[in-house]
Structure formats: C-alpha cells, structure tokens
C-alpha cells in the first residue's frame, strides 16, 4: 500500500518551487493555474480551462483522455458522449499513463492537507480573483501561493500498483480546486528534480514563466513523452559543440506548432507522426488539440524514415546534403556496409562530379527506391479541442468537426487563392497540401 500522508521536506519544496516558477511568481499567475481537472457540461470528455496559462498541463492531459476514450479501453467505440463516471475513468487512465511514462523507480502523489479550507484568503487576492473570473465563481480557489505550499502533503509509492491505488484514493484531489497544480507537482517530484535538470537545455530556466504564466517546451515534452528535453526535433544534435537533446522515439501523442511555419523551430518525424492520431497544436501562447478517429492516418516508422533521421544527424544545418567524408559512418550506422571498397564505390556513384557532397535525395534513391508513402486515406474527419470557452462557438467547450482532404501539389496550386488561417497554417507543417472545411463554417481558434 502507499505510504501515509507526510509533509514535504522544506528544501525539496523550495527546490520544486524554484524549478517550476523561478525565483518569483506573480500571485495573478499562480491564481490562473489554480483550478482542477473539470469537464465541460457541453462535451462529456472535454476538459475546461478557466484562464490562460495551465494549457501546458490541461491540453496534454486532454490528449491522453482522448487516447483512452478512443483507442485503449474496451468501451472505446468512437463515441465520446459518455457518462460522467466513464469520463472520470478516462481521466484517471490518462493521468496514470503520464506518470508511468516517467519510468521512475518510485512515485510521489501530492495532495493538500485533509480538511484544509481553500477558500480562506486575504481580501486583496480574493478581490483580484473575482475580477479575473468576472465575478464570484465557485470554481475558483481563493488561497494564495504561500498558504497553498504550506498545506502540501505527499504520498510515497514504491511500485506501479501502489501508484494506481494511491491515485484512485486521491483522484478527487485532482478534480477539485488546485488539482492541476497538485498533479503537476506529482509529476515533477516523481520524475525527480535533478533528473529534470539533466534533461532540460538550461537548468536555470523555470518550467513556467513566473511573469506571464506560459509553460515551457520542456514541460510540454515531459508530459507528452516522459522526458523534459527542450527541443522537438528527432534525436540529439550537436550544434557549435553543444549537445542539444531532442525526441528519441515515436510517441503516442503528436505535436505541431505555428512556430515551425515561422522557422523558429523544427518538429521532427516522431512528433509529427505519433502512434495515435492525436496532436497538440501550439500557437505562440496557447495549446489546443486536433484528433481523428481514423487510425489509418498514422503508422509506424519505416526503414526509409529511420534512414532519413540518421542522415540528418550528419546534416546538422539541415541543408539536405552531407560531406562525402561522413558517408562511411552513415553507411555503418544504417548497417548498409562499412568496407572501404564498398564505401568508395558508393561515394563515386553518388558524387560523380566530385563536389564533396552527397544529397539526401540521391542517397534515398540509391538505397530505398521502393519506399514511398504509406496508405494514408486522402480524406478524413478531424476534431479540434480548445479548453478556453471564450475561444469556442457560443462560449461552449465542444469538439469542432472538420474534414481534411490531402491534395497533390498540382491540385493545391490550382486552388483559388484564399486567406489562410492559423490552424491550416499549423497543420500544413505536417500535411503541406491540404484543404480543410469546418462544420458550420466556424474556423477553430488556436488561441
């Protein structure tokens, strides 16, 4: 059984606060993160987000709820209009799986001290919260950050069975006020502060911006993949002598971002092609979710894709070619042959003009000529989720249905030029030539 409830060690608590929030967090930012995992009254399995900020936790949890509702349970029949009890079950499985991905040798579940009064607070903070939520809202907590941290209690779990039992016993802690934060603290402490610092690019940067309240890419990656790496490309890269960590395997949930269209980052194959047809969509300030019930639009990694990823390890600048001096290492890593005579033959064939480079296209054509596109349907239905009610039609958090048609480049060029939308631009980082129509002609918002 899980251990009894104990107070957090003061030094561990301080280190956790600094890792999450930095040296200082605005009370207003903390209050925006202070909510539980709550479902929309208009969509049985859709979580609601009361204010900006906690999408970095709520949206990833939403993706795992959808994974279990659509693809993992005996009740998964494509119907998301389920009972409240079943929705809570999917929430439990989603929260549990995210913790399991951490692959820790022990887990810590964080709750509040029993019978603590979370509505007691000073008048100034209470007044500010009422202004933030547009008035007195029974769903909004009214305890400041220092009181919150003083009431934190932890439950040590030394096995996955103990973790499951402990989570079942304390699931209501995550659905009540402060539940999002309690779960986030559980993830951080279960992963381990030092382990997170080893994985992030800059250990001095907090996982949440204490001024604006946005979650970092490291936090998003931690929840999606179990590793707090700071980049979204495939594998690790060495840039200017520095090792930059990326995503190391195909994940269950994908990730697409507008920032790739703006050339601020590179999303690798692993996150663009998850095992389940569910993607986090990132704008500059918010996270939403796109999903489909059509499993045929995702597929396992092929030999061709593995070869491209290995090739790109030798092409750090993303130029589409490598130096001929790297050919031997490339062939050896792909188990294609490493004998000097063979390498020389391949080099002479692929660099017949002695330019000193080998292009990706010529390499792929030589060794993987039969590999092509998977049997992805060219038309499928998708759904979009945005947890902020003010960003949804009629301020109701529901899934918005759309239809995607994959086009060939010639068909795309022949389309009448229409104004693009942020969500279409984001999706084009995965599907470059698409046509999207949305039910009732309401284009979903990424913000």
Image: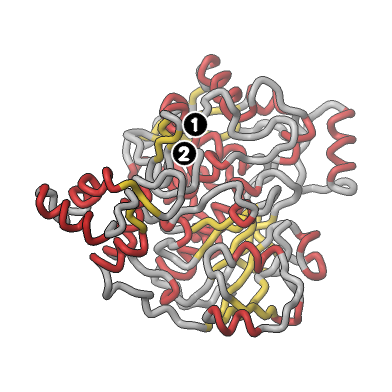
Question: Which badge, 2 or 1, is on the more N-terminal residue?
Answer: 1
Dot 1 lies on which element? loop
* Distance (Cα) linking label 2 and label 1: 7 Å
Q: Which mark is residue 159?
A: none
Label 2 belongs to which residue?
A: 229
Say whether residue 9 is left or right of residue 36. left
Q: Nearer the viewer, residue 238 or 348?
A: 348
Q: Which residue is found at the position 73% from the left and 63% from the top?
A: 445
Question: 115 left or right of 294?
Answer: right
The part of the image, by quadrant, that contains residue 371 is bottom left
The color scheme shown is secondary structure
Mark 1, Cα crowd under 10 Å, few <14 / some 14-19 / many 20+, is some
Front position in the image: 390 or 444? 444
Above or below: residue 6 compared with residue 383: above
Q: Is residue 248 visible?
A: no
Indicate the position of residue 93 as horizontal and vertical percent values: 45, 55
Is 315 placed above or below 145 here?
below
Question: Where's residue 83, x and y in %?
Answer: 57, 69
Tell which of 130 and 407 is nearer to you.
407
Q: Are marks 2 and 1 in contact (CB under 8 Å)?
A: yes
Q: Quadrant of the N terminus?
A: top left
- Seen from the viewer's position, the closer of residues 33 and 372 is 372
Q: Is residue 295 left or right of residue 407?
A: left
Residue 364: image quadrant is bottom left
Helix, strand or loop at mark 2: loop
The image's mark for residue 201 is 1
Q: Which residue appears farthest toward the front when viewing the image?
A: 353
Q: Position of residue 31 (x, y in %)?
A: 75, 37
For image coordinates 25% across by 66% down, the residue present is: 366
- Taking the image as shown, residue 180 lies to the left or right of residue 100, namely right
Neighbours of disc 2 within 10 Å: few (<14), some (14-19), many (20+): many
How far across and down, in percent of the image, does residue 219 sit? 54, 40
């Amino acid at each position: 059984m899980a251990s009894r409830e104990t107070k957090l060690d003061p030094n561990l608590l301080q280190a956790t606060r600094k890792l999450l929030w930095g040296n200082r967090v605005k009370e207003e930012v903390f209050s925006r993160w202070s909510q539980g995992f709550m479902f929309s009254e208009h969509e049985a399995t859709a979580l609601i987000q009361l204010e900006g900020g906690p999408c970095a936790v709520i949206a990833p949890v939403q993706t795992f709820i959808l994974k279990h509702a659509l693809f993992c349970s005996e009740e998964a029949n494509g119907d998301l209009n389920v009972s409240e009890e079943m929705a809570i079950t999917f929430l439990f499985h989603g929260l549990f799986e995210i913790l399991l991905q951490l692959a820790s040798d022990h887990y810590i579940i964080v709750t509040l001290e029993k019978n603590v009064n979370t509505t007691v607070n000073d008048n100034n903070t209470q007044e500010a919260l009422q202004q933030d939520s547009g008035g007195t809202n029974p769903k909004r907590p009214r305890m400041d950050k220092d009181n919150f941290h003083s009431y934190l209690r932890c439950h040590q779990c030394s096995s996955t069975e103990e973790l499951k039992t402990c989570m079942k016993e304390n699931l209501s802690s995550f659905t009540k006020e402060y539940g999002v934060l309690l779960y986030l603290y559980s993830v951080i402490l279960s992963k381990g502060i030092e382990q997170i610092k080893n994985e992030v690019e800059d250990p001095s940067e907090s996982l949440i911006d204490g001024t604006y309240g946005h979650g970092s890419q490291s936090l998003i990656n931690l929840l999606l993949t179990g590793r707090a790496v700071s980049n979204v490309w495939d594998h690790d890269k060495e840039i200017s002598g520095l090792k930059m960590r990326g995503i190391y395997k195909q994940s269950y949930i994908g990730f697409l971002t507008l920032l790739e269209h703006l050339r601020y980052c590179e999303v690798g194959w692993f996150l663009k092609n998850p095992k389940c047809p569910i993607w986090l969509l990132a704008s500059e300030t918010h996270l939403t979710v796109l999903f489909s019930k059509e499993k045929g639009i995702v597929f396992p990694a092929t030999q061709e894709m593995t070869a491209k990823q290995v090739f790109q390890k030798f092409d750090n600048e993303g130029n589409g070619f490598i130096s001929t001096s790297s050919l031997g290492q490339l062939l050896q890593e792909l188990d294609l042959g490493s004998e000097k005579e063979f390498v020389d033959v391949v080099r002479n064939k692929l660099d017949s003009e002695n330019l000193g480079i080998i292009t990706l296209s010529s390499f792929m054509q030589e060794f993987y000529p039969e590999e092509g596109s998977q049997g992805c349907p060219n038309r499928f239905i998708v759904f979009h989720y945005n947890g902020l009610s003010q960003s949804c039609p009629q301020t109701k958090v529901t899934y918005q249905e759309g239809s995607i048609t994959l086009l060939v480049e010639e068909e795309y060029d022949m389309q009448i030029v229409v104004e693009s939308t942020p969500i279409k631009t984001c999706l084009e980082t995965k599907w470059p030539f698409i046509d999207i129509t949305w039910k009732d002609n309401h284009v979903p918002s990424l913000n």
